[in-house]
Image (cartoon, rainbow, N blue to C red):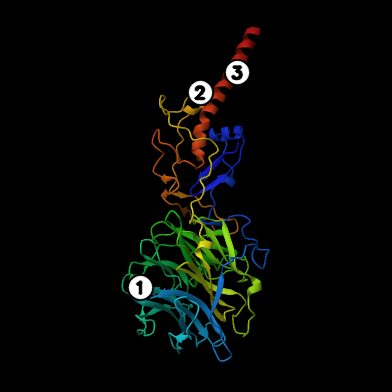
Amino acid sequence: MPLITRSPRRRRLIGTGVLGAAVIAAGLVALPASAADDAAPISVVDGLIDTSDLNALGLPQAENAETVTIFSPEDDDPKFNHGTTLIPFKGQLYAQWQSSETDEDAPETVVRYAVSDENGENWSEPMDLTAPRTDGYTSNGGWWTDGETLVAYLNVWPSDLTPRGGYTLYVTSENGVDWTEPRPVTDENGEPLLGIIEQDTKALPSGRLLTAVHVQPGLHVKPYFTDDPLGVTGWTQGEFENQEYLPNEMSRELEPSWFVQEDGDVVMTFRDQGGSSMYKLAAVSADDGETWSESTVTNIPDSRTKQSAGNLADGTAYLAGSLTGTKTRYPLVVVLSADGETFTDGFVLRDADDLQPLRYEGKSKNLGYSYQKSLVWGDDLYVAYGTNKEDVEYTRVPLEDLSLRGAPEPTPEPTEEPTPAPTERPTEEPTEEPTEEPTEEPTEEPSPEPTQAPTPAPTSEPTEAPTPEPATDPAVGPTSGPAAPGEPTEPGLAPTGADSAAALSPLVGGIAVTMLAGVALLVIRRIRRA
């Protein structure tokens, strides 16, 4: 019978015979490397994404997904439109993006926005949040609101700054029409934030705001958090060690997004700008963004683009984007995880066949659903993007079509019936194999979970640092030690490796005693014959 061992937040079949399991339980051989925990904090199950399927990546179509065009340029309009972000404010949906005549990051680039009705379907004409600069350009940094005041972040890129980088300003409005003059976003010391803010400011369950900033010199991405509900002061850099890409100019990690795992840890995913992979990078924080593991390469394909991640209303974690493993930014898909560690389900929101043609040429304009950012509003997940860096659009899909935690999952059946706690015998392990009283085996105890697991580096990537593991696993309980004598293990879950070893110890002991007795009998017989 195969053994099932449960690593933190994951069950894995390791499959050995009884004799092999007995040897493992006795500590005579090591577990195979394939049974060890993955290096990265997140993964996608094998076979979910088929990168050879250029139209849909092997994923089914989200049947109730619908796409809305916020702005589509005509001949007299700015034809480069990129970086769409959304936010609900006082019952309406707001969209923000950067816009220029034909080319990306051109000197005339400005930040524009539009406002929808309460359904997010009918949109106003675009309005400018900024004017063209003579000393550089301004791109959009996304939104935030405390419910009463709307904040628009503005990223300023001075033309004379070397290496290339910038700083962040903000404007506010109480009605979405009248805006304040731009002011600098400030750090915990009240100083201007010298970096480009990521368009991904969101609230943690604690209420703390978390995003990332590409700090000077150049663009070195760092997680940043603040406890200012308005998100304009007190931004503090989390402890995070970058992998260098261009020394003193750019980190390997860029343009992240983040979500919360079932156990409360925060995972930040990054574009792998400087590595040789076309996979997402990921790092973990167990203390609300204050300290982070080093980033590691995951097995989740990416298109080397801005990240989009989050949690649905029921806690399901999602990643939205073009998971092609190439620089191709279509199709647009979403993958889902109930625990925020293993992504097991997915849908295509817009496949390659649904992509409209590019109508206007320009610098850095390429086909695809580019730079996705997403949010949950009402009963839907909204994923916004710039199609062909030209049309400002979003696709929404009902949460009920995506949620993995909405209905209780059936409890998996254990491979053996749980052993009740003994009532007449002590809980210590017996020295002999029980033959007539199998129900009196000692109660299985969960093995202590280490506070962090070693993180082996991928063979083709620089050495990765250990990825911190949470101190408490909701599925296992506190990791400070094993269960008390007589305490039953959690019903419906397979025993851990240590449990299996404990259960097999009587068998191993009995085998050992039997073998020794047999050897002794043979020796005695030979002595008598001699």
- Packing grade of label 3 (10 A; few <14, some 14-19, many >=20) is few
Query: Quarter-wise, where is residue 511 in the image?
Result: top right
Q: In this figure, what is the number of numbered marks?
A: 3
Q: Which sits in the foreground, 461 or 411?
A: 411
The amino acid type of the residue labelled 1 equals Gly
From mark 1 to mark 2, how far is it between C-alphas? 67 Å
- Mark sitting earlier along the chain (1/2): 1
Horizontally, residue 376 falls left or right of residue 280, namely left
The amino acid type of the residue labelled 3 equals Gly
Q: Which residue is mark 2?
A: 432
Q: Which residue is mark 1?
A: 147
- Residue 518 tag number: 3
Q: Nearer the viewer, mark 3 or mark 1?
A: 1
* SS at circle 2: loop
Check if mark 3's residue and mark 1's residue have beta carbons within 8 Å. no
* SS at circle 3: helix
The image quadrant where one finds the N terminus is top right
